Amino acid sequence: MSEDCIFCGIVDGEIPGRTVYEDDAALAFLDANPLTMGHTLVVPKTHYERLEDIPAGEATDFYAALHEVVPAVEDAVDAPAATVAFNNGEAAGQEVPHVHAHVIPRSEGDGAGP
Ligand code: 5GP
Ligand code: ZN
């Protein structure tokens, strides 16, 4: 838990979030400003700022959550594909300093890609 971190607040239930998946290591919830229907964020429950800050063992657990969430989100909105992306650092557009994967359901010609 990091004070003043929005995503830690969602993990702790202090800030409302629309949870779509949860396990011991990770939480997935709908993005408040979706780029496409079903746009989901996947976060480690422990506060780390950048992808490379996650210790190797925990990174494996985080990847396991992604492995579950990506196809589940695609199925939920009947999308044939998804863009899965990290903004890793402020200069790349990371606005929330708690590592998060964007899972953005995609369809042909939707123009929603990075
Ligand atoms: P970033 O630019 O850091 O990669 O993405 C941050 C994402 O978090 C944005 O897509 C934004 O819409 C989302 N976001 C920011 N604040 C909240 C919030 O309080 N709740 C939820 N569900 N999403 C948020
Ligand atoms: Zn945090």
Image (cartoon, rainbow, N blue to C red):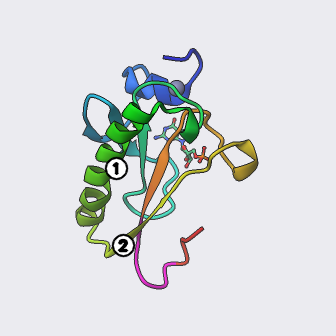
The reply to whether the magenta stretch includes residue 106 is yes
The reply to whether the magenta stretch includes residue 29 is no
Q: Secondary structure at mark 2?
A: strand
Above or below, comparing residue 51 to residue 37 in the picture: above
Where residue 43 sits: x, y (%)?
43, 38
Amino acid on which the number 2 mark rests in the picture: Ala
Which residue sits at x=25%, y=33%? 23
Above or below, comparing residue 79 to residue 3 in the picture: below
Amino acid on which the number 1 mark rests in the picture: Leu
Q: Does any portion of residue 18 appear in the rendered image? A: no
Tag count: 2
Q: Which mark is residue 81?
A: 2
Which residue sits at x=24%, y=61%? 76
Q: Which mark is residue 66?
A: 1
- Left or right: residue 24 compared with residue 15: left
Q: Quadrant of residue 89?
A: top right
Q: Quadrant of ligand 1?
A: top right
Which residue sits at x=70%, y=51%? 92
The part of the chain drawn in magenta is 105-110
Q: Does any portion of residue 77 appear in the rendered image? A: yes
Label located before the other in sequence (1 or 2): 1
* Disc 1 to disc 2: CB gap under 8 Å: no
Q: Which mark is residue 48?
A: none
Where residue 20 sits: x, y (%)?
28, 44
Where residue 104 sits: x, y (%)?
44, 61
Q: Quadrant of the C terminus?
A: bottom right
Where residue 55 sits: x, y (%)?
47, 30
- Left or right: residue 93 compared with residue 103: right
Q: Nearer the viewer, residue 46 or 105?
A: 46
Q: Quadrant of residue 94?
A: top right
